[in-house]
Image: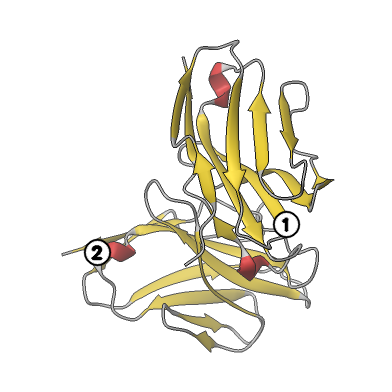
């Protein structure tokens, strides 16, 4: 079964440092999402891509977060500088097309701890 | 804000049916009910979805009330591996149907 690949699985970084997460969606999936999940909460959408274009980044803290999907395939989410409150699970998901909420496939996430 | 209300937690005995309720009293006519679950340390996994008819697949059954204001996810024979957080999500069935998660229900299946 096809999977969404994410790396690293775990990341510990000091506050004020830069950190990056990588996501490789299922081949052929045009839509890619980054979610953040704080412990005990449901995932919160940060950014949505359709191919290489950003469709929705209204919840992305743009002063420190950036996301790109240059060739419309894999994607990178960056935080610079990291703050203690950024400690969370960062989940990537892909779907064949925008919407159609049954079609999301999630990766296993990157667990970030900021110290 | 999430458009659904779910109990925070539930317990179920192994081998018994698990019935997870969800209230979505403000659902609109073109919105579907979706269920995802998240096993510890994994990403959410799609379970089932429906509009107004009851649905069944290999994982679960979804019962939607006639007025569509509430629904129930049924796991017919719960196993220990079904222990997870279950999310009920209401979303448009078309191009605007992005997933907005609430806090979900923590289901604990006990031996």
The image quarter containing residue B67 is bottom right
Figure coloring: secondary structure
Q: Which residue is mark 2?
A: B80
| Residue B108 horizontal/vertical position (percent) | 29, 58
Could you tell me which secondary element the residue under label 2 belongs to? helix
Residue B73 numbered tag: none
What's the residue at 69%, 52% (across, down)? A32
Q: Which residue is mark 1?
A: A31
Visible in this render: residue B24? no
Could you tell me which secondary element the residue under label 1 belongs to? strand
What's the residue at 76%, 62% (across, down)? A98
> Are circles 1 and 2 on residues that touch, CB within 8 Å?
no
What's the residue at 52%, 49% (across, down)? A5
Up the image or down, A56 lies above or below B38; here it is: above
B109 or B27, which is in the foreground?
A: B109
Q: CA distance from mark 1 to mark 2?
A: 33 Å
| Residue A40 horizontal/vertical position (percent) | 46, 41
**Dot 2 surroundings within 10 Å: few (below 14), some, or many (20 or more)?**
some
A46 or A50, which is in the foreground?
A: A50
What's the residue at 33%, 65% (across, down)? B82
**Dot 1 surroundings within 10 Å: few (below 14), some, or many (20 or more)?**
many
- Badge 2 sits on which subunit? B
Q: Is residue B11 left or right of residue B99?
A: left
| Residue A101 horizontal/vertical position (percent) | 66, 66
The image quarter containing residue A45 is top right
């Amino acid at each position: 079964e096809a999977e969404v690949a994410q790396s690293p699985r775990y990341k510990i970084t000091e506050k004020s440092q830069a950190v990056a997460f990588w996501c490789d969606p299922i081949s052929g999936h045009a839509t890619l999402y980054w979610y953040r999940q704080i412990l005990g909460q449901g995932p919160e959408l940060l950014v949505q891509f359709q191919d290489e274009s950003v469709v929705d980044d209204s919840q992305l803290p743009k002063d420190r977060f950036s996301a790109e999907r240059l060739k419309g395939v894999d994607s990178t989410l960056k935080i610079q500088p990291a703050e203690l409150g950024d400690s969370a699970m960062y989940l990537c998901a892909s779907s064949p097309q925008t919407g159609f909420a049954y079609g999301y496939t999630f990766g296993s996430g990157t667990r970030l701890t900021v110290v | 804000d999430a458009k659904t209300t779910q109990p925070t937690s539930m317990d179920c005995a192994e081998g018994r049916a698990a019935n997870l309720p969800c209230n979505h009293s403000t659902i609109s006519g073109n919105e579907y009910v979706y269920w995802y679950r998240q096993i510890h340390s994994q990403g959410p996994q799609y379970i089932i979805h429906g509009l107004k008819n009851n649905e069944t697949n290999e994982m679960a059954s979804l019962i939607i009330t006639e007025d569509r204001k509430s629904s129930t996810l049924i796991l017919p024979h719960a196993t220990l591996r079904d222990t997870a957080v279950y999310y009920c999500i209401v979303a448009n069935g078309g191009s605007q149907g992005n997933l907005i998660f609430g806090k979900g229900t923590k289901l604990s299946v006990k031996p």
